[in-house]
Amino acid sequence: MSENDEKCALCHERKKLCSSHIIPNSFIKKVRRDSPQLIVVTADETTKPRRDNVGAKEKMLCHDCEQLFSSNFEQYGISLLRRSKNIVKGNKNIIVYNYQHDRFYLYCLSIFWRMAQSKLDEFKNVLFPPRVSDIIRNCLLMNTLAINERMDINEIMRINIIKIYDPFSEKRTYYIQNILCPCHTDYTNNEYKISFLAEGLFYTLRLDLNKNNFEKNKNKGLPLGKALKIKKYDYREITELHYSIDCALDKTRKYPFI
């Protein structure tokens, strides 16, 4: 231990911290392609797109915990959704095989947890109640869904994933695949809802503090079987995304050489 060591957000030990990506670096590389920079688009009518060395990184995890996240969660989650042999595409759904519910759930949860831990401006609205944040941290650290002997974390927190596309335009669908939308948040008295878009997939986490509501909707999260069924939606049907995607697509046409 040295005087420059800081507390790791996951293991809580004082160690030298890495510059950790909040959004997995694999997402960023896919959007950036061969360019060293990303094109940043603001969802409004006036701001001109700009190139930036964005990567949403900050000192958060020690080396051991960074490797734990990579080996336990990210390598599995990214490869599952990118290997063509795992995927069967239909008109209304995508079926992903070689799916393991617990591993994929923790992969998704690890991204939402990093967002909530981040001090960067783009994630300042991502919050969990302190007790819930501690529960998530322990599940990720121990690589388990079990909160205790009687309850798993997916019993209080639902994660969903859907495919976003434009059914009227393959070109617009291609552009949507290359939009990285860091997060949307919506909090009411009883429900926390956090979501983000990456590679045409819209991930949503819901924490409902009203147990009766959760029991009513408990089967709407990730499936427990051996295949992941991802429904396809016209992006115009998704309130959180419609305006942002339209802005990005319009500015792509308006500023083609940025």
Image (cartoon, rainbow, N blue to C red):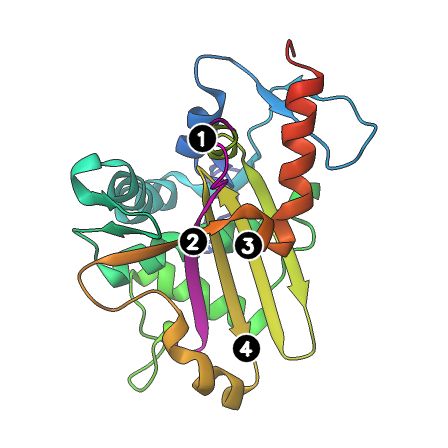
* Residue 162: mark: 2
| 106 up-or-down from 164: above or below | below
Query: Seen in the image, is 68 located left or right of residue 165?
Result: left
Q: Secondary structure at mark 4?
A: strand
Out of 39 and 142, give the one closest to the viewer.
Answer: 39
The answer to whether the residue labelled 3 contacts the one labelled 4, judged by CB atoms less than 8 Å apart, is no
- Would you name the residue on which mark 3 appears? 195
Say whether disc 3 or disc 4 marks the residue closer to the N-terminus.
Answer: 3
Residue contact at pointers 4 and 2, CB within 8 angstroms: no
Residue type at the position of mark 2: Ile
The percent position of residue 208, horizontal first and vertical second, equals 54, 77
For the residue marked with disc 1, what is the amino acid? Answer: Glu
Residue 170: give its label: 1
Between 200 and 29, the one lying in front of the other is: 200
Is residue 170 a member of the stretch shown in magenta?
yes
Residue at the top extreme, as displayed: 257
How far from the left and from the top, in percent, is residue 130? 59, 70
**Badge 3 element:** strand
CB atoms of marks 3 and 2 within 8 Å: no
Which residue has dot 4 on it? 208
